[in-house]
Image: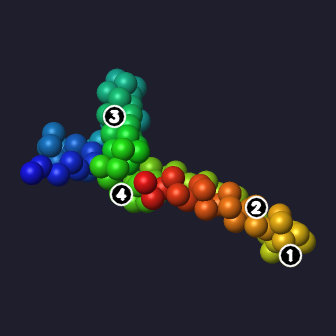
Amino acid sequence: MATPRPYTTQGLCLFIGIAVNTFREYQSREDFVTVTTRAREIIYTQKFEGAAVGAFNANIIARDLGLRDQKDIRINDITQMTDDELDEAIRQTESKLSFLTL
C-alpha cells in the first residue's frame, strides 16, 4: 500500500534536477516569482491539508510550517491569577493542543 508523503522543496528540487540554493535564487528573480510562489503554495497546502485529515503527523507538519499558537505569559502574570483563571488558561491551552494531535 502506498503511503502518502508530504511535499517538500527539497523533493521538488531533486525531481526537477536543481539544487535547493538554485530554487532560492529563482525566488528572488522577477521572471520566476510566479512559478516559485505557486510551488511554495502547493507544498504548504498539501502539508497543511494532509495534517488536517490525519495523513501526516500534525505536530511535525505544524512545526515545519511554522504554525504555533504562542502566548506570552510572564511568571508574574501566572502568580497573580486566581485558581479559576489558571484553570481556564490550562483548558484553553489543552484545547489548542488537541487540534495538533488529530
Give the residue at mark 1.
Answer: 79
**What is the CA distance from the residue labelled 2 to the residue labelled 3?**
37 Å
Residue 66: image x %, image y %?
A: 50, 52
**What is the CA distance from the residue labelled 2 to the residue labelled 4?**
28 Å
Q: Pointers 4 and 3 in contact (CB under 8 A)?
A: no
Residue 1 left/right relative to 5: left
Give the residue at mark 2.
Answer: 88
For mark 4, give the secondary structure.
Answer: loop
Q: Pointers 3 and 1 in contact (CB under 8 A)?
A: no
Residue ID at (16%, 39%): 16
Q: Which mark is residue 92?
A: none
Q: Amino acid at mark 4?
A: Asn
Dot 1 or dot 2: first in sequence order is 1
Give the residue at mark 3.
Answer: 42
Tell me: residue 15, above or below residue 86.
above
Give the residue at mark 4.
Answer: 57
For mark 1, give the secondary structure.
Answer: helix
Dot 2 or dot 3: first in sequence order is 3
User: Can you tell which of label 4 and label 3 is closer to the viewer?
Assistant: 4
User: Can you tell which of label 2 and label 3 is closer to the viewer?
Assistant: 2
| Category of crowding for the residue at label 3, using alpha-carbon neighbours closer than 10 angstroms: few (below 14), some (14–19), many (at least 20) | some
Dot 4 or dot 3: first in sequence order is 3
Residue ID at (41%, 45%): 52
Residue 41 left/right relative to 23: right
| Category of crowding for the residue at label 1, using alpha-carbon neighbours closer than 10 angstroms: few (below 14), some (14–19), many (at least 20) | few
Q: Pointers 4 and 1 in contact (CB under 8 A)?
A: no
For mark 3, give the secondary structure.
Answer: helix
Dot 4 or dot 1: first in sequence order is 4
Residue ID at (88%, 69%): 82
